[in-house]
Amino acid sequence: MHHIKHKSPKVENASLLNHNEMERKEFIQQCGKICLGGFLMGGLLESCAGNYYATTTLANDQIAIKKSEFFEVKNGISKPRKYVLVKNEKLNFPISVYKINEDTYSALYMECTHNSCELLPILFVKN
C-alpha cells in the first residue's frame, strides 16, 4: 500500500506568502533604486542643459575668451556665468574655465587621468 503525502493548504499558503513577501521587498528596493537613479539623472541632465560653450579664438597655440562670454543675457537682463566650457578641434576634451573674480580665472582640462573619459563640470566657486 502506497501512502501519498499531501501538503496541507496552510503550508502551501504560508510558503506562497513568504515567497510573495520576498518579491514585494525586492520590488520596493528596485523602485527605490529607480527613483534615486531618476533623481540623480535629472540633476545630471539639468547640469548638462546649463553648460555654456564659449566662442573662442586660437592664436599662437593660445585660446582667447572674451570677458563677455562670462555673462548671459536673457530678455535684456545680464546675469554672470561662473564658468564656461571651451571646445577646440585640437583637444580631445573640453576645458572648463572658472571665473574667480574680475581678472582671475582658473582652467581645468576635463579629462579623467585614470579612465581617459570626460569629466562633468562642477561648480566649486562660492557666490
Image: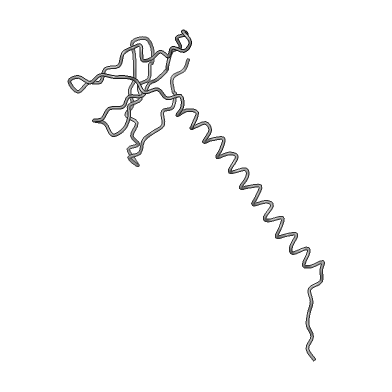
Residue at the image point whose x is 48% and y is 15% from the top: 127
Q: Nearer the viewer, residue 90 or 99?
A: 90
Is 7 placed above or below 108 here? Answer: below
In percent of width and height, residue 30 lies at 61, 47
Apparent side of residue 127 relative to residue 60 in the rendered image (left or right) = right
Apparent side of residue 92 relative to residue 3 in the rendered image (left or right) = left
In percent of width and height, residue 102 lies at 37, 9
Q: Quadrant of residue 13?
A: bottom right
Residue at the image point whose x is 34% and y is 31% from the top: 110
Is 17 placed above or below 94 here? Answer: below
In percent of width and height, residue 123 lies at 44, 24
Which residue is most to the front? 75
Q: Quadrant of residue 57?
A: top left
Please identify the quadrant where the N terminus is shown. Answer: bottom right
Is 75 placed above or below 112 here? Answer: above
Q: Nearer the viewer, residue 101 or 33?
A: 33
- Looking at the rendered structure, the number of numbered marks drawn on it comes to 0
Which residue is most to the left? 60
Residue at the image point whose x is 42% and y is 14% from the top: 72
Which residue is most to the top? 76
Residue at the image point whose x is 35% and y is 11% from the top: 68
Colour scheme in the image?
one colour
Q: Quadrant of residue 88?
A: top left
Apparent side of residue 51 relative to residue 33 in the rendered image (left or right) = left
Apparent side of residue 5 relative to residue 109 in the rendered image (left or right) = right
Is 108 placed above or below 32 here? Answer: above
